[in-house]
Structures are given as C-alpha cells and as structure tokens.
Image: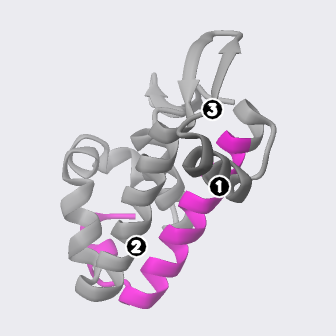
C-alpha cells in the first residue's frame, strides 16, 4: 500500500484496522512471553508495578515497558480517529520512507501489521522478505 493510498483511507476504518493490528500483536506478546492474556498483563502490571520474566534469548522483560508502549499505540488510534491518516503517517514517517517499495504490494491489513511489528521489533526486513523475530 502506498503512502497516497494510506492517506485516502477513511479515518474510522484506519483506526479500527490499526487498533486490531496492535491488539493482536500485543496479545501475542502477552501470551508468548508472560503466558497470560493482554488484559491480565495490564492489570497485573498496574497492580504490582511490573512482572519480570527471564529465559530463552530474552534476558529480562518488564510488563510496565510493554504496557507503556501499548498505551502509546492506543493513543495513536485515538489520534487517527481525530486527525485521520495523517496521524498514522506522521508516526511512521521513517518506516514508510525506508520501506515504501516493500509495502507497496501489501493490502491495508498487511501494511498495518508490518508497521506495528516493525515498531515493536518483532519483525524486520531481511533480504527483501519480512521475517518474524519475536515470539
């Protein structure tokens, strides 16, 4: 999907699809690393300050960092509803510039998923192919 195409997407549709992309990814992170649903992870993090997990390739993860990042993304959904596609394209300007040719052939859902996964570091572009690097 090109930047021009993203700019023409209805703000409510874009906010709904972006919200679904972030919820899906953060749910996968919560289950994959902490073995609990996202909602419980948020509650436990707020109640206890943080939950730490050690093991595998990840030496230490803190839920408060994940919850803060998730809150930022939820706020971006609100901005998209208020400001339209401009809020999304401003937030992802570097990604959209660097990967414009790779995302040009993707549909809206695939583009948003790639953007979210790239931002949280669970996906990266390797030799022209999107590769999952997270759980």
Q: Quadrant of the C terminus?
A: top right
Residue that protrudes farthest toward the right in the picture: 35
Question: Which residue lies under the disc numbered 2?
Answer: 77
Q: Nearer the viewer, mark 2 or mark 3?
A: 3
Q: Residue at x 52, y 80 (%)?
A: 16
Query: Is disc 3 surrounded by few (<14), some (14 to 19) or many (20+) residues within 10 Å?
Result: some
From where the camera sits, is residue 116 visible?
yes
Quarter where residue 55 is shown: top right
Q: Secondary structure at mark 2?
A: helix
- Residue at mark 2 to residue at mark 3: CA–CA distance: 26 Å
Classified by dominant secondary structure, the portion drawn in magenta counts as helix
Residue 119: x percent and y percent? 40, 42
Query: Is disc 1 surrounded by few (<14), some (14 to 19) or many (20+) residues within 10 Å?
Result: few
Q: Residue at x 65, y 55 (%)?
A: 43
Question: Which residue lies under the disc numbered 3?
Answer: 51
Residue 87: x percent and y percent? 24, 71
Quarter where residue 132 is shown: top right
């Amino acid at each position: 999907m090109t930047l021009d195409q993203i700019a023409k997407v209805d703000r409510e549709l874009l906010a709904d699809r972006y919200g679904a992309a972030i919820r899906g990814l953060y749910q996968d992170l919560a289950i994959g690393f902490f073995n609990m649903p996202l909602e419980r992870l948020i509650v436990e993090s707020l109640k206890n300050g943080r939950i730490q997990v050690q093991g595998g390739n990840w030496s230490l993860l803190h839920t408060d960092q994940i919850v803060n990042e998730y809150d930022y993304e939820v706020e971006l959904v609100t901005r998209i509803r208020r400001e339209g596609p401009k809020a999304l394209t401003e937030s992802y300007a570097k990604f959209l510039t660097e990967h414009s040719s790779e995302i040009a052939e993707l549909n809206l859902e695939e583009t948003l998923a790639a953007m979210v996964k790239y931002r949280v570091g669970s996906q990266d572009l390797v030799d022209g192919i999107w590769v999952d690097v997270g759980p």
